[in-house]
Image: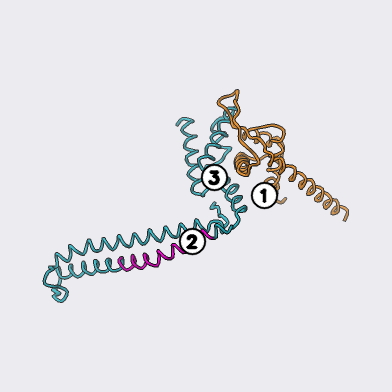
Amino acid sequence: MADNSEWMAQWRRGALELCVLRILKDKVSYGYEIVAVLSRLGPLAAGENTVYPLLRRLRNEKLLEAIMIDSPKGPPRQYLRITDAGLAQLKARQHEWNELRESVSRCLELGSKA
Amino acid sequence: MSSDANQEIYLAKFSKELRRLNVQDASGIAGDVRGHIGEAIADGRSLVETLSALGPPSALARAYAIELVVADAAKTRWSLSSLIRLAMLLLGASIVSLTLVPLLLVLAFTFLLTGAVSFAFAVVELLIVDLPFIQNEHFSPLEALGASIPIFAAGCLFAWLLWRYLRYIAASLRRACAPLRRPSIQT
């Protein structure tokens, strides 16, 4: 059987940004917690060394912003919050993703009928 | 070695690698990673497990470089002001270089050659044969030998200055042309 790991990695890389923005749409979170949420989503699980650089880039692009919140487990912790620009980006990407998913599904169904 | 020491060694290597890869705000990113390590430990993971999950410092730095440097390069657009800055740099460097480079080259070549030839002839005359045609009435072979060393050293100094100047110009041009090139992350 062919090795699909690289193929999956490419898909995951593209989808990860969308998923991180979606996770942060509902509530503020911090890096390690975001990694933990993704790890429960099967194929979307990505290591810290993938997620943390992505979070930094999203902050640089002003799609996320950092805020300090007191932590019950120690010193104040840096949380990430989605910005208005991030919400707009999420909406646009979600729309593109839905269209892509429907196109791929239609294409695969077409193939099965052929 | 204590846990804190391991963490500091990891972060120091990570920062160094970020700088080598020309990632902006290396200290800020290292601060972020320090925070992420703290989060994981506060949530019950050991430092060893946390550092292991992050991977080697060089690999983590490359991941940041790929994510940040490539994203920056993709956004970079040549503006009129950046082109004017590059043109001014090239013009200024050319005018100064037209004077300075030939001057340093001639001085370096002349002093190095004079020093080396004086030294060689002085040694030959002292040890082997009499060469009256290279002497004048004021300099003995020993004096010529003594003078040849500072002359050669001055030649080395001019050659070094020339080398440093050329390297400075090359680095300035590389920085000015950076938006033209896509960054290549060495793995």
Q: Is residue B46 magenta?
A: no
Q: From this view, report whether residue A60 is shown above or below residue B172.
A: above
Chain A's colour is orange
Q: Nearer the viewer, residue A76 or A34?
A: A76
Viewer-nearest of discs 3 and 1: 3
Which residue in the protein does label 1 denote? A6
Which residue in the protein does label 3 denote? B61
Quadrant hosting residue B153: bottom left
Viewer-nearest of discs 2 and 1: 2
Q: Which chain does tag 1 point to?
A: A
Q: Secondary structure at mark 3?
A: helix
Q: Residue drawn 18% across and 64% down?
A: B145
Q: Which chain does tag 2 point to?
A: B
Q: Which chain does tag 3 point to?
A: B
Side (left or right) of B48 relative to B110: right
Q: Percent from the top left, x then y, of residue B93?
A: 43, 62
* Outermost bottom residue: B133
Q: Neighbour class for label 3 at 10 Å: few (<14), some, many (≥20)? A: many
Most frequent secondary structure within the magenta stretch: helix
